[in-house]
Image (tube, helix red, strand yellow):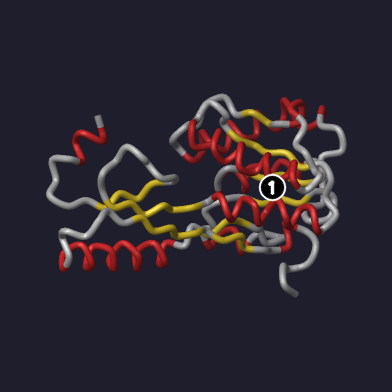
Amino acid sequence: LISESLKSFRSVIAVVPWKMEEWDLDQVIHDRDSSLREVAEHFATSGRRHPTVVMNLEDNTDTHKFAVFSRACDALGIPIRDEDVVRLGGQPRQPEDRVRAYMTAMEKSYKKLEGVDAILCVNDVGEMAVAKYLREHGVKIGSDVALVGLNDPIALSLWDPPLASIDRNHQGLIDVVLEMLDIRKNNPKLPRQTCVVPMHFVWRESAGGKRPGS
């Protein structure tokens, strides 16, 4: 249905999380995969051995994130154990409901986890909720457990300790979309173009270890 609707426009650039092979239009792949692999590599090189994720695995984008991150962890010798995945029951829209969902998921699962020393959360609200839970239960974030989220609003840098995340590289995305629109306007008969805009892992103290490259 989406693909058919897009065909009604004269020229379209779609921003997508991965390449849509069946779509005959210009595409900008807003790539989170490389940043997820960066997080896995940081966990491994900083000595973490039992990572887990806090995600809604009924959501197709979360399923994709989990697959990429899990494969990267496997390749680095720090596999994610199925029994350690903290599974959200759906993804509520309102922030306060999302906080409650994360806290409930952690209450159900965290005490059962065996030796988990690194956590990846699917988004910023989730990371803050998990950080709140860990702090309330006496867990030292960054030393006992490394913690990384996704989206990187400025609030994460104001936490104690500052929370690591994945920056969505919005400015890079804007620049590429505008450039591709200009190219398409000036060269309408060019073959369809695909460009990749990577997101980036942002190290802060919650991730533990040393800043990559330092």
Q: Is residue 170 above or below residue 52?
A: below
**Residue extending farthest bottom:** 214
Residue that appears at 16% across and 64% down: 185
Q: Where is residue 43 in the image (x, y as percent from the top left)?
A: 76, 53
Could you say which quadrant of the image residue 204 lies in? bottom right
Q: In this view, does 188 lie above or below 76?
A: below
Q: Image check: 174 left or right of 123?
A: left
Badge count: 1
Residue 52 appears in view? yes
Residue 135 appears in view? no
Q: Which of 119 and 182 is in front in this view?
A: 182
Residue under numbered circle 1: 131
Identified by mark 1, the residue type is Ala
Residue that appears at 61% across and 42% down: 68
Structural crowding at the residue carrying mark 1, measured as other residues with C-alpha within 10 Å and reported as few (<14), some (14–19) or many (≥20): many
Residue that appears at 40% across and 67% down: 171
Q: Where is residue 211 in the image (x, y as percent from the top left)?
A: 73, 68
Q: In this view, does 145 lie above or below 211?
A: above
Q: Position of residue 8 (x, y in %)?
A: 13, 40
Could you say which quadrant of the image residue 117 lies in? top right
Q: Image check: 210 left or right of 127?
A: right
